[in-house]
């Protein structure tokens, strides 16, 4: 596959300003300027987020598009990959967001713009439950970077969710993948193996 379109889905309370999104976008601008990049600001409602994403990628070519997702965006990326058949790279992906985000119901602030507030509603938990994909099909489409040192999500749960996928399991690390640059070759090799 020669990559022509790449979708990046950020995590909960995050944005297109995330360090990983900006770094990947900068790498593509330097090395693959012809690749169409899209990292939308996702609304708090999972149903609205997926409607926005699926609408935005409706005309993308199936055979040369891929998705990357971080944390909650990794859960969304799995939904997208199962719906489209695209390759996916998951960065410390959320496995059970309906369970894990219940404690965040209420007013929240955005990481990259603390002055921006949004309300995470109880019905959003039901929306997450309703869209949860079953067991992954074609595990070879998936690659994941998972940190044992993730302070938010359990690495065992993450690795168990993607049996047969190409997993880069880090002994330490953190939820943000602060050493993201070290993993770019692994990520890009999965997305664009012709390189």
Image (cartoon, rainbow, N blue to C red):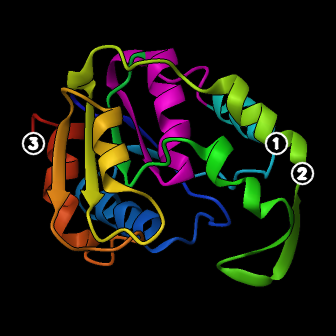
Kindly indicate whether the residue at mark 2 contacts the one at mark 1 (C-beta within 8 angstroms).
yes
Query: Which circle, 1 or 3, is nearer the viewer?
Result: 1
Give residue 58's quadrant in the image: top right
Which region of the structure is painted magenta?
57-84
- Give the crowd class for mark 1: few <14, some 14-19, many >=20 residues within 10 Å: some
| Residue 8 visible here | no
The one nearer the camera, 49 or 194, is: 49
Q: Which of the labelled discs sits on residue 195, or is there none?
A: 3
Q: Please tell me whether residue 182 belongs to the stretch shown in magenta.
A: no
Question: Tag 3 or tag 1, which sits nearer the N-term?
Answer: 1
Which quadrant would the C terminus be assigned to in this image? top left
Give residue 25's quadrant in the image: bottom left
Q: Please tell me whether residue 83 belongs to the stretch shown in magenta.
A: yes
Give residue 13's quadrant in the image: bottom right
User: For this view, does 120 lie left or right of residue 112?
Assistant: right
User: For this view, does 114 lie left or right of residue 2?
Assistant: right
User: For this view, does 151 lie left or right of residue 75?
Assistant: left
Residue annotated with mark 2: 121
Coordinates of residue 28 in the picture (x, y in percent): 32, 57
Kindly indicate whether the residue at mark 3 contacts the one at mark 1 (C-beta within 8 angstroms).
no
Question: Tag 2 or tag 3, which sits nearer the N-term?
Answer: 2
Coordinates of residue 101 in the picture (x, y in percent): 69, 54
Residue annotated with mark 1: 124
Quick one: SS at disc 3? Answer: loop
């Amino acid at each position: 596959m020669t990559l022509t379109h790449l979708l990046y889905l950020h995590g909960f309370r995050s944005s297109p300003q995330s360090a990983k999104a900006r770094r990947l976008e900068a790498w593509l601008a330097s090395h693959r300027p012809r690749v169409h990049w899209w990292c939308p600001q996702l609304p708090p409602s999972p149903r609205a987020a997926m409607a926005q994403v699926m609408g935005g990628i409706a005309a993308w070519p199936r055979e040369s598009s891929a998705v990357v997702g971080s944390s909650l965006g990794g859960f969304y990326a799995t939904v997208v990959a199962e719906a489209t058949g695209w390759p996916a790279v998951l960065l410390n992906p959320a496995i059970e967001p309906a369970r894990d985000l219940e404690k965040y119901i209420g007013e929240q602030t955005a990481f990259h713009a603390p002055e921006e507030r949004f309300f995470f509603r109880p019905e959003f938990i039901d929306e997450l439950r309703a869209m949860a994909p079953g067991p992954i099909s074609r595990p070879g489409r998936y690659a994941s970077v998972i940190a044992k040192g993730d302070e938010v999500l359990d690495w065992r749960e993450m690795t168990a969710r993607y049996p047969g996928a190409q997993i880069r399991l880090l002994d330490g690390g953190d939820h943000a993948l602060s050493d993201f640059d070290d993993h770019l070759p692994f990520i890009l090799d999965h997305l664009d193996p012709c390189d």
